[in-house]
Amino acid sequence: MSPNAESTAFRSALEVIRAVEPRVADAIGAELADQRESLKLIASENYASPATLLAMGNWFSDKYAEGTVGRRFYAGCQNVDTVEALAAEHARELFGAAHAYAQPHSGIDANLVAFWAILADRVEAPALKRAQARHVNDLTEADWFALRRELGDQRMLGMSLDAGGHLTHGFRPNISGKMFDQRSYGTDPATGLVDYDKVAEAAREFRPLVLVAGYSAYPRKVNFRIMREIADSVGATFMVDMAHFAGLVAGKVFTGDFDPVPHAHIVTTTTHKSLRGPRGGLVLCGPELADQVDRGCPMVLGGPLPHVMAAKAVALAEARRPDFADYAQRIVDNAQALADGLLRRGAKLVTGGTDNHLVLIDVTGYGLTGRQAEQALLDSGIVTNRNAVPQDPNGAWYTSGIRIGTPALTTRGLGTAEMDGTAELIHTVLSQTTAGANPDGTASKAKYQLDPALADKISRQASELLTGFPLYPNVDLG
Ligand code: PLP
């Protein structure tokens, strides 16, 4: 590849876009400039490679391709078949899974595909058998009515939101909470860790159809072998949502009991977080659930996005290279260096540290809410997001935590020395920010005071920290 190929590709693309709607071209250019300047510590974000980004912007976007590889409801899908088959093959090889489904448009969609595959397998198929019907269309009105009731009467056990679980694991604001009767397992109040005995006890009492593991804000590993034993003991299907840590599984940082693929009946993930691919989802499973998973579209998904599947194939091919394992290890090394740097400066961390790519700071130690801390950090050029901590006194909106993650900065090449510098900047901002008051004198959960001169100084220091680590170094937009 010529040294200027990436610059030429992106410059040409912007020129073509600019000729139609210059404001879009300008916004795309501005987004790159903003991303280059900010210290991005959002645990769920990353920087996809130029090859992954370019694989998305083309005529694959024009194609309808409902169905699966070789079995489409539309003609002319031979090239879509090529990229979907490649994405699935790379996913199977990378994760050691028997079956991979590359169509989900996002993590939420991947979870919906998995939930409906489980319901179809565990509830619908037996009902069809009982009624001696091959297809739901063959059921009598009475049998169909009974099946719909039964589908809506199933239970799910998942991690509580404040312990780090995700809204799609059966919580009421999400469709999963309207589909399932859900109970949560939390973490041990003293250690902040998953208490497997408590999970087993909850499973015995509640007898869920589905046991879900996986998280967006739990800074430790989960033992999936034990979770599978718990699921088996109550006849539950064991599902793992590895959206956040898929990159650590792909990079063989999480192996043995901590690799969900050999232990779970079904695994879902996003492709854009630690896995560093395009925005999208994947489902992995064994042969037992494969046919049901492949019905994801049109069961819950709109038509596949072939351009995104092409990009998934590129990103998964990248993740199969040996250097991805090195990247995954550096993500964790960096998260641990960041945690150590914060702890040394007196920060309070949920579980006292991290085993993965994220750190959860309990900012009540600084006298702040998550909302105040998030905004003060943003004023200082540090992009994070607020997050609930276990038994959070400030609820899910204001929260008491700041979640920080290292996949993005690790992609830029920052290492453990820079993580100590990052910890210094974060600690300085949080310790110099004070909680504000409402006009009536009561404590505000949103208002705060931070000297603007200090915020500016930290912003400059944050960009200095990034100077040796250019983002998309081969892309010069001129
Ligand atoms: N599952 C988990 C554990 C997540 O953290 C997220 C995203 O935050 C999702 C699912 C949803 O992913 P998406 O935003 O791609 O739908």
Image: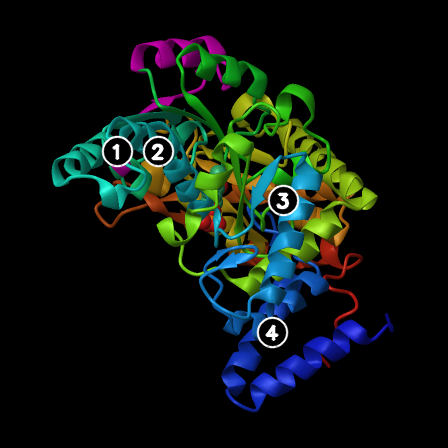
Q: Which residue in the protein does label 3 denote?
A: 274
Of residues 111 and 430, the one nearer the viewer is 111
- The answer to whether marks 2 and 1 mark residues whose Cβ atoms lie closer than 8 Å is yes
Which label is found at residue 58?
Answer: 4
Number of other residues with Cα within 10 Å of mark 1, as a class: few under 14, some 14 to 19, many 20 or more: some
**Region in magenta:** 179-206
Q: Would residue 224 be counted in the magenta stretch? A: no
Residue 345 badge: none
- According to the picture, the residue beneath numbered tag 1 turns out to be 151
- Examine the rendered structure and indicate whether residue 263 appears above or below residue 195: below
| Kind of residue at disc 2 | Leu
What amino acid is at disc 1? Answer: Leu
Mark whose residue sits in front, 3 or 4: 4
Q: Quadrant of residue 247?
A: top right
**Whether residue 299 is situated above or below residue 246 in the rendered picture:** below
Residue 453: % across, % down: 57, 58
Question: Along the horizontal axis of the image, is 322 left or right of 38?
Answer: right
